[in-house]
Amino acid sequence: MKKILGIIAFAFLIMHMASAQEVLGGRIMISGLDVARTEGNLFVSMDMDLSSLDLKTDRELIVTPVLYTGTDSLSLSPVVIAGRNRYFHHLRNGISPEEAALYREGSTSVVEYRATVPYSGWMGRADLRIDGLVCGCCGAPLDGESDFLSALDMEPRVFMPSFVYLSPEGEAVKMRVEKGSAYIDFPVNRTEIYEDYRSNADELRKIRSTIELVRNDPDTRITSVSIKGYASPEGPYDNNVRLAKGRTRTLKEYVRRQYDFPDSLLHTSYEPEDWDGLEKFVRSSGLAGRDGILEVIAGGLAPDAKEWKIKSSWPEDYAFLLKEVYPGLRHSDYAVEYEVRTYTDVDEIRRVLRTRPQKLSLQEMYLAAQHMEPGSDEYNETFEIAVRMFPDDPAANLNAANSAMSRGDLKNAGKYLTKAGNSPEAVYAKGVLAALSGEYDSAGKLFGEAAGMGISQAEEALESLSELY
């Protein structure tokens, strides 16, 4: 497939009039009319057959092509065909207007007319007319005529695709999870929780708020509450096992007492020393011993030996970690898993979409979108919400890409299409993105592939591309 040089092809041929056309009462025959343009200029060419012209020696005919709309007009360079006396008068005295081309009647049978003018946007829908003015011996107008030649159609050729959205598969059971981390302060070497100790009141409130958000929602049913406790690496490993295990058990009992949950609903685990959390911090830090500490963390030493190696080799860095980082490694991660009922009422889905979109399935969001005005802010936002809730789902990414392309956001469309998979609809969408980006060769190949996969819109897209050539 040939390479298109832009939305408007360079020197793009707008029209060609193959048959001859009589103008100005049969005085002149016009043939070979061509109008073309680049982004900066308009080109007009035609052949003017003068063989039927009959002028008196002191008369002349001024022929002027004119671009005309209801509000704008531009006269192109005129052609003056003069009888003998008028011709020699112009040779002696010059011709007005100065840009006019002068011909003596009978000296040539065909004038090859060529004109170039700067292009302006209004010309794209102008009429091309030809005006003829017969003047006498002193240049006085005697009579005039005007004839229509052609209507120009030079509006930019823009690829206008159809977007193919994909209906997502439904969820048999909608399971969701709310997660968080709490930083409960325990007295040194103890496992009891004191609610008024340091910031414990706020941290415990975080856990309760997460649970109550789900528990108080009539559309949901809690199926599991999980707690995983972590201790920091300082001190003997065996003691940290005791602390992590005991503090996690204590937090579990706190939650059970608050809500009278059965034991079967509560699940716990623990990590005696949060080396992963330490590694993450050190990797992003500017510590002087950063690389050495990372090597120790990743090495095969036992936990207590690791801690001693860091403490003895980089004492200043270790002091900083102990004070500023280790407290954050003593945390309890919690997760509330729950089941959400199915929604079928579109108005209800739209309300939930604005408040708790995580409760909806992709299929429910898609159902709501079918009742919105395509291209509206609400319609586009629905697909944006869907891809935020399901960032790795191919259907969510495909539909978000279509929505982005429809409003000209090609950058995000490209990002979404990298996760849209290789379904027929995705192949077609990639072709649309290529076409909108000016990559017409790639677009044509992708549309051809999508057409072979059964996407009927791909055939229409190929036809639209062909009109740009």
Image (cartoon, helix red, strand yellow):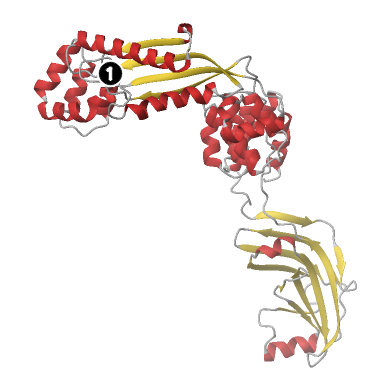
Could you say whether the residue bearing mark 1 is in a helix, strand or loop? loop
* Residue at far bottom of view: 138
Quadrant in the picture for residue 60:
bottom right
Which residue matches tag 1?
Answer: 274
How many residues crowd mark 1 within 10 Å: few (<14), some (14–19), many (20+)? Answer: some
Q: Quadrant of residue 376?
A: top right
Residue 374 higher or lower than 344, as above or below: below
Query: Looking at the image, which residue sits at the far right?
Result: 25
Q: Residue at x 64, y 68 (%)?
A: 117
Q: Give the x, y percent position of residue 238.
A: 21, 8
Write the residue at 60% across / 42% down. Answer: 436
Q: Residue 141's spot in the image, x, y percent?
A: 82, 87
Left or right side of 462 for 85? right
Task: Name the quarter where the C terminus is drawn.
Answer: top right
Q: Nearer the viewer, residue 422 or 460?
A: 422
Q: Is residue 95 visible?
A: yes
| Residue 165 shows in the view | no
**Residue 48 on image: x %, y %:** 79, 68
User: Where the N terminus falls, by quadrant?
Assistant: top right
Q: Is residue 382 above or below residue 272?
A: below
